[in-house]
Amino acid sequence: MNLGMDKITKLPNKQKIALLIVLLLAVGAALFFFLIQPKYNELKKLEGKLTGLQEEVQKNRILAAKLPILEKEYQQLKIELAAALTELPNQKEIPALLTSVTDEGKKAGLDFLVFRPLGEQPKEFYAAVPVDIAVSGTFSSVGNFFAAVGNLPRIMNISDVKFSDIKSSGTQTSLKVNCRATTFRFLEQKEQKNDKKRKK
């Protein structure tokens, strides 16, 4: 070791400076590649993660700001769903509903020729309950009947309306009407599951 140092001390100053510069560059390169560069790469990764987290925090802040509005909308939808469900009779109410349809027809002055409930038609979460109806009476009685059915507290659609045997006598027109009245009922979860099994 001393021999090396002796040789170095005997070198001219220019060579000593050049040797010192080479030594410093070697130490600097070693420090850069083994210490600074890994830390720099780690810093870049952490900066990328930080940016991602900041974006996520910003998105969550926006969602948090919307939360009261969304909760209000959710409560409103619950109220609307409850109101809609009151318009769908359950299975026990169907006979009473059908009776009220015939009562409205009789009040309007119609004679029932046909009142034939058809089989239920299950859908996704409700079932359609159609009834074929044939009535006879005056044109105004038919109009009053349809209006009364439309004002029932439960949903009742009238479709496939066909007029026949139209006769005029004086100021009144009598006719026969064939139509289909359809109400709907909400299927309970058990019924929905059974319907899905049947479809499979």
Image (tube, rainbow, N blue to C red):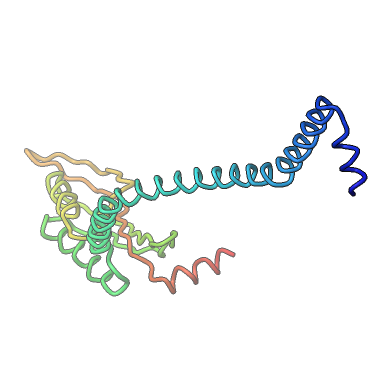
Figure quadrant of residue 188: bottom left
Q: Position of residue 73 (x, y in %)?
A: 26, 52
Q: Residue at x 27, y 71 (%)?
A: 95
* Residue in the image at 48% along x and 48% along y: 53
Marks counted in the figure total 0
Residue farthest toward the left in the current orientation of the protein: 171
Q: Nearer the viewer, residue 75 or 147?
A: 75
Toward the top, the furthest residue is 14
Q: Nearer the viewer, residue 45 or 60?
A: 45
Identified at 33% across, 57% down, the residue is 132
- Residue at the far right: name it: 3
Q: Nearer the viewer, residue 45 or 185?
A: 45
Location of residue 94 with respect to 161 vertically, above or below: below
Q: Is residue 70 left or right of residue 43?
A: left
Q: Position of residue 180 (x, y in %)?
A: 32, 53
- In the figure, is residue 192 to the left or right of 179? right
Residue 92 vs 102, above or below: the answer is: below
Q: Residue at x 65, y 43 (%)?
A: 41
- Looking at this view, is 130 or 161 the one in front? 130
- Quarter of the image with the C terminus is bottom right
